[in-house]
Amino acid sequence: MNEAPLRLWRNAHIATLAGDPAASPWGALIERGALLARGEHIAWVGPEGELPRDIDVAEEHDLGGACLTPGLIDCHTHLVYAGSRAHEFELRLQGASYEAIARAGGGIRSTVAATRAADDETLFALTLPRARALMAEGVTSIEIKSGYGLSLTDEACCLRVARRVGEALGITVRTTCLAAHALPPEFEGRADDYIAAVVEWLPQLQAQGLVDAVDAFCERIAFTPAQTRRVFEAARGLGLPVKLHAEQLSDQGGAALAASFDALSCDHLEYLSAEGVAAMAAAGTVAVLLPGAFYFLRETKLPPIDALREAGVPIAIATDHNPGSSPTLSPLLMLNMACTLFRLTPAEALRGLTVNAARALGLQATHGTLEPGKRADLALWAVDHPRDLAYRFGGANPCRRVVSGGVDMEL
Ligand code: NIG
Ligand code: FE
């Protein structure tokens, strides 16, 4: 029989993150655990003493008691862009608001200008090290949005770069078309015409295999709920799942709208209302919280964490890496901030970067937990207990190894 070789990782403190979090927030915590992978998939996980006998292991790794978790999943990033917004950071520190800078033509538009001026190769060369930096802290799956091209060719270019990054690194990349991110200057005063253009681009981008999901920015400085609805209707017509940048700066009722389209996730959510929470709960939509943007924009209004918890809305955490509101490449810092700023427990935070992040990408059947049949995406940490991952912050990177689809990655 021509089966893929078995690989074994043993002598590990394993947190599977699988099963009901009410019963066990880390999933099974296995003191002296072992994990077997056949090819790309997990074949077995459990206590080392119970390893199946008579197996022919091609490769064996003694992990020396280190912690083994699912590879982290960064389910919200804007990784493809050129230019810097450090100057806007200075302006904000002098009192200018994120919204005022955007209205004055800076913000997303300034990144669009820099991104359009860069060619494919330059964008690829800028994006690759960003993805590598995420991997160095345990990430094996990344969602990458477009949204700094805002024309058919420039959006296609950014999405192609995203795909290429996944292929070059051997990790999972999910692409999200965020053409409805901001109004490009050539459409000034014609937001409805721009939305009509986006609706025309979507099938073309999809036909090129570039779109796994569709996102929009529903906000005073971006698009109205009515315009967002048109984008979502187009996505639905193409069979593409939707997500939304919702209630980041104000309550637009975006989350309820997205939930009515069975959105995979609504993201940011500082201004989310009780109705929004209820609509997300009913639709099974994931709340993706972004502590980096909350921190960097010096937001003071917290997302309604208790209400989300009580309603049973799954909570994910992501870096939201982008040059304007969250220029971080540290998922571990996000774990820490999710706890300190949003009062998540360390286990909730780690679930947010694994099992619930998988769900925010529609990947829950294949990613996010250590269970037989799932992809062998692993992160190995020099810590005693997984809670340590959220405890440290800034420069203390305990990640020792990541494995994507059963293959050791170069860090
Ligand atoms: O997720 N809110 C909109 N989009 C990004 C920020 C984009 C930018 O400022 O360049 C976000 O925060
Ligand atoms: Fe974002």
Image (cartoon, rainbow, N blue to C red):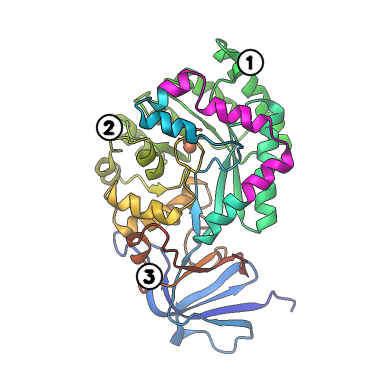
For the residues marked 2 and 3, what is the alpha-carbon distance in whole angstroms?
Answer: 33 Å
Magenta highlight range: 100-128
Q: Position of residue 115 (x, y in %)?
A: 64, 33
Helix, strand or loop under label 2 = helix
* Residue plotted at (62% across, 57% down): 171
Position of 213 relative to 91 (above/below): below
Task: Name the dominant secondary structure of the magenta segment.
Answer: helix
Q: Quadrant of the C terminus?
A: bottom right
Q: How many marks?
A: 3
Dot 1 beta carbon under 8 Å from ligand 1: no
User: Label 2: which residue?
Assistant: 274
Helix, strand or loop under label 3 = loop
Q: What's the amino acid at mark 1?
A: Glu
For the residues marked 2 and 1, what is the alpha-carbon distance in whole angstroms?
Answer: 38 Å
**In this orientation, which residue lies closer to the viewer: 241 or 150?**
150
Q: Position of residue 298 (x, y in %)?
A: 33, 36
**In this orientation, which residue lies closer to the viewer: 24 or 299?**
299
- The 10 Å Cα crowd at callout 1, few under 14, some 14 to 19, many 20 or more, is few
User: Label 1: which residue?
Assistant: 186
Q: Earlier along the polypeptide chain: callout 2 or callout 1?
A: 1
Q: What's the amino acid at mark 3?
A: Ala
User: Label 3: which residue?
Assistant: 28
- The 10 Å Cα crowd at callout 2, few under 14, some 14 to 19, many 20 or more, is some
Q: Quadrant of residue 382?
A: bottom left
Residue 210 shows in this picture? no
Which-is-in-front pick, marks 2 and 1? 1
**In this orientation, which residue lies closer to the viewer: 337 or 222?**
337
